[in-house]
Amino acid sequence: MTLKKSYELLENADPWACIASKLMLSIRVVSAIYRKHLKKHNVTMSQLSLLMVIGKHKFLPQNEIGKLLKLERSTVTRDLKRMIEKGYFIKKYDKTRPVIYITDKGADYVELIIPDWKAATEEAKSKLGTDGEQALNLVLNNLMR
């Protein structure tokens, strides 16, 4: 079926000029690299981010995790729930706020994943090249201001 009328705005719009589209396409390409390397660990990138960030800090207040990682509260809550059930984290209460602690099981799991995460990072860096990695750092710094 063909269109019955002209859509000037649509016809003149360039979807490749859209910043969000470019970033989303970049995310899909890089995410595929990480999924390939991390597939055997059955971990998502948001779960790995939680493991690594909380692991580096040893513990974090739950409300700080989403802020640090720029993740939606519902994503943090969902992923933490699953990972607490697996024994990677424990939740304790400091006064009135929940604090998330990594367990030895969680730290062991991250240690197992890191070599494949590094391989994925190296593959992504090789595709980006030095200029691309520097450009990505610049873009991220500009967006985080």
Image (tube, rainbow, N blue to C red):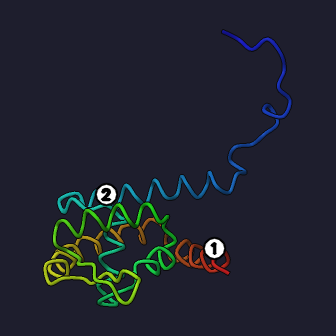
Residue 122 quadrant? bottom left
Contact between labelled residues 1 and 2, with CB atoms less than 8 Å apart:
no
Residue at (70%, 51%) from the top-left corner? 18
100 horizontally vs 11: left or right:
left
Q: Which residue is mark 2?
A: 35
**Front-lying residue, 98 or 45:** 98
Instruction: Classify the position of the C terminus by image quarter.
Output: bottom right
Amino acid carrying mark 2 in the image: Arg
Instruction: Classify the position of the N terminus by image quarter.
Output: top right
Q: What SS does tag 2 mark?
A: helix
Circle nearer the N terminus (2, 1)? 2
Amino acid carrying mark 1 in the image: Val
Considering only vertical position in the picture, is 38 above or below 103?
Answer: above
Q: Which residue is mark 1?
A: 139
**Front-lying residue, 68 or 100:** 100
Residue at (75%, 14%) from the top-left corner? 3
- Residue 6 x %, y %: 84, 20
- Residue 143 x %, y %: 65, 74
Residue 135 quadrant? bottom right
Number of residues whose C-alpha sits closer than 10 Å to that of mark 2, classed few (under 14), some (14–19) or many (20 or more): some
Residue at (19%, 65%) from the top-left corner? 85
- Residue 72 x %, y %: 49, 64
Q: What SS does tag 1 mark?
A: helix
Residue at (67%, 78%) from the top-left corner? 142
